[in-house]
Amino acid sequence: MRPGRSLIVAALLAAAAAPPASFAGARQSGGGAPPRRLTAIAALRQYPAYFHLQNVLVHGEFAGDEPAIVLRGGDHEVTVILNDARTRSGLVEVRGQLFDLGRMDPADPRLGAYQHKPRAEDWPRPGEELVLNVTSVSEGQYAATPSIRALALQPWRFVGQKVTVAGEFRGRNLFGDLPSAPGRSRYDFVLRSADAAIWVTDLRPRGRGFDLSVDARVDTGRWLEVTGTVSEDRGLVAVAGTALAATTAPEAETHEEEPPAPPPPPEPGEVVFSSPTEGETDVPVAGTVRVQFSRGVDPASLPDRIRVTYVGSAEPPPPFTYTYDAAARAVEIRFANPLQSFRTIRVEMLEGIRTFDGAPVQPWNLTFSVGG
């Protein structure tokens, strides 16, 4: 092939690979995850594994009285932990983190504010009990016009209606924007706008100047305007499309940055072992007491929070000193004088002892009997 013809062919190939003019400037980064997931309570209940520990934003109305308050959206509701937030009347916009109790440990400190936490022996299975850990509550607005955001947050207001919405083409959920697929046709695809997403079904994503593949990331990021009828099934919001066209992305909107999910509070400490053991008898009068904790403690929190007494006696407590072994996470108590024979001793770790990172240590006591 002559050099001049090579240049012409290369130019034609480059032109064919370029996006159509109607998409100019519309392509966005397809891989970035949204800072939070805008969804409806129905979806939270249908797909708890997907939303577990995710930052979510939902619309609904509070119902019930403390401590049994729920957030209700459409025909579905979820229990809430309000923390420092306050309820409002009417529609509210709630941000929080979803807890699926069955996927958490009963001792998880993040559940410390949940007043209806089941007993460990009655702990629910995954998906059985969901709680929304609220971080903020603000006034909500009922959507007057359809948009992807409105359909995602308030689907019950639009089901059965014919709408026109615009969004970024995301293929067949290639970026995990939604928890599942409706499976209605081979061309089902996701449209996303800002931090909300819906499905479009029954319509192949092609039109004048474009033919997009639902399985190719290279085609994502382009903006489409879709007309169709809204439905909601198994927590998935979809538009059964009848028409679509290329469009351009709207001017970038500024959204409040979603704060990261708060880290779990430090795990509380507790006594896990002692020598002597609880109820032990015939303990030597010159013996020592060793108490081991589940986590390292702050030595500065120990003074005046260790108490030793003779049970059932008004006698002064036996004088003692103690040392803390950080490597073993243990306190060793040594008595200044031999303990009185045939007496019962109580050792107490009082409220106020804290772990090295500030978590409380559960108060504890030990009773044992001294030999002859």
Image (spheres, rainbow, N blue to C red):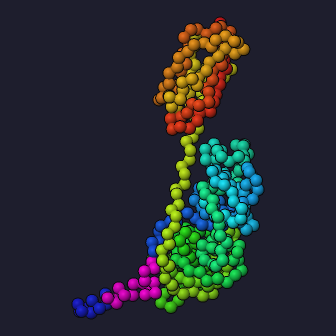
Task: Find the residue positioned furthest to the right.
Answer: 64
The foreground one among 337 and 372 is: 337
Residue 202 lies, with reference to residue 338, above or below; the image says below
Q: With 287 as the anchor, is 14 left or right in this view?
A: left
The foreground one among 152 and 280 is: 152
Q: Position of residue 251 (x, y in %)?
A: 48, 77
Tell me if residue 346 is in the magenta stretch. no
- The count of marks equals 0
Tell me if residue 15 is in the magenta stretch. yes
**Residue stretch in magenta:** 11-27
Residue 37 lies, with reference to residue 183, above or below; the image says above
Quadrant in which residue 309 is drawn: top right
Q: Quadrant of the N terminus?
A: bottom left
In this rendering, does residue 46 appear at all? no
Task: Find the residue positioned furthest to the left.
Answer: 3
Q: Position of residue 130 (x, y in %)?
A: 68, 55
Quadrant in which residue 345 is drawn: top right
* Residue at (60, 77) in percent of width and height: 147
Q: Quadrant of the C terminus?
A: top right
* Residue at (70, 56) in percent of width and height: 79
The foreground one among 65 and 17 is: 65
In this rendering, does residue 288 appear at all? yes
* Residue at (57, 86) in percent of width and height: 244
Q: Position of residue 293 (x, y in %)?
A: 56, 30
Residue 151 lies, with reference to residue 129, above or below; the image says below
* Residue at (57, 59) in percent of width and height: 55
Q: Position of residue 132 (x, y in %)?
A: 65, 56
